[in-house]
Structures are given as structure tokens and as C-alpha cells.
């Protein structure tokens, strides 16, 4: 990831957060799984699992969009390499 997500990492790693809160790396994996799904998973289904803290929603969505673009780019490269229309 090229953007600075230190605020999100700090927020998620705060000791006052519930223990079941995603760490930053767990969040990356979770968002990668959603972006890799063959079916579109509506934001309304997965965002509540992360939380609704307004201070991080923008960062979470930015991270999701970045991961989603990377997944789509990889899929396009595979399709081109395999000559899948």
C-alpha cells in the first residue's frame, strides 16, 4: 500500500478498542477477501463488521478501493496472459 495508513493502524491498535477489533493487517486480509469475491459484497454488509467510527470510515474505504483496484488489475493481467476475453 502506498498511502500512509498510520492513523488507521494506530486507531485499530489502540489498547482501549475491544479485543475482537481487526488489526491493520487483519483488515487488509479481510478487505482483500471481499475484493476477491466472485460476487460483489455490498459495503452495507461488511462495513459494520469493522465499525462505524466516523474518523476511520474514510480511511477504510480508501484502503478498500486501493485493494480492489489491485485485485482488478491482477485479474486483468491474468486474463490477458491467458487470453480470456
Image: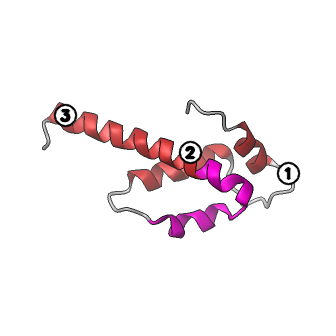
Q: Residues within 10 Å of mark 2 (few under 14, many from 20)?
A: many
Question: Which tag is nearer the camera, tag 1 or tag 3?
Answer: 3
Name the outermost residue toward the right: 16
Q: How many numbered marks does the figure carry? A: 3
49 left or right of 81? Answer: right
- The relative height of residue 53 versus residue 4 in the rendered view (above or below) is below
Where does label 2 land, which residue? 63
13 left or right of 46? Answer: right
Q: Residue at x 64, y 60 (%)?
A: 50
SS at mark 2? helix
Report which quarter residue 70 is drawn in. Answer: top left
Q: Residue at x 45, y 66 (%)?
A: 42
Assess whether mark 2 and mark 1 are in contact (beta carbons under 8 angstroms): no
Position of the C terminus, as image quadrant, is top left
Point out residue 16 in the picture as x, y percentages from the top left corner: 87, 56
Secondary structure mostly seen in the magenta stretch: helix
**Is residue 59 located in the magenta-colored stretch of the structure?**
yes
In terms of sequence position, does the residue under pointer 1 or pointer 2 come before the other? Answer: 1
Report which quarter residue 76 is drawn in. Answer: top left
20 left or right of 66? Answer: right
In terms of sequence position, does the residue under pointer 1 or pointer 3 come before the other? Answer: 1
Point out residue 43 in the picture as x, y percentages from the top left corner: 50, 64
- The relative height of residue 68 versus residue 3 in the rendered view (above or below) is below
Front one among 68 and 18? 68
Question: Over which residues does the magenta segment extend?
Answer: 42-60
Point out residue 63 in the picture as x, y percentages from the top left corner: 56, 45
Where does label 1 land, which residue? 15
**Is residue 28 located in the magenta-colored stretch of the structure?**
no
Where does label 3 land, which residue? 80
Amino acid at each position: 500500500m502506498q498511502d500512509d495508513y498510520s492513523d488507521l493502524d494506530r486507531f485499530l491498535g489502540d489498547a482501549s478498542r475491544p479485543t475482537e477489533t481487526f488489526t491493520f493487517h487483519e483488515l487488509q486480509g479481510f478487505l482483500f477477501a471481499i475484493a476477491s469475491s466472485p460476487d460483489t459484497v455490498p459495503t452495507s454488509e461488511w462495513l459494520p463488521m469493522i465499525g462505524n467510527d466516523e474518523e476511520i470510515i474514510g480511511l477504510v474505504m480508501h484502503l478498500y478501493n486501493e485493494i480492489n483496484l489491485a485485485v482488478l488489475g491482477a485479474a486483468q493481467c491474468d486474463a490477458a496472459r491467458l487470453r480470456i476475453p
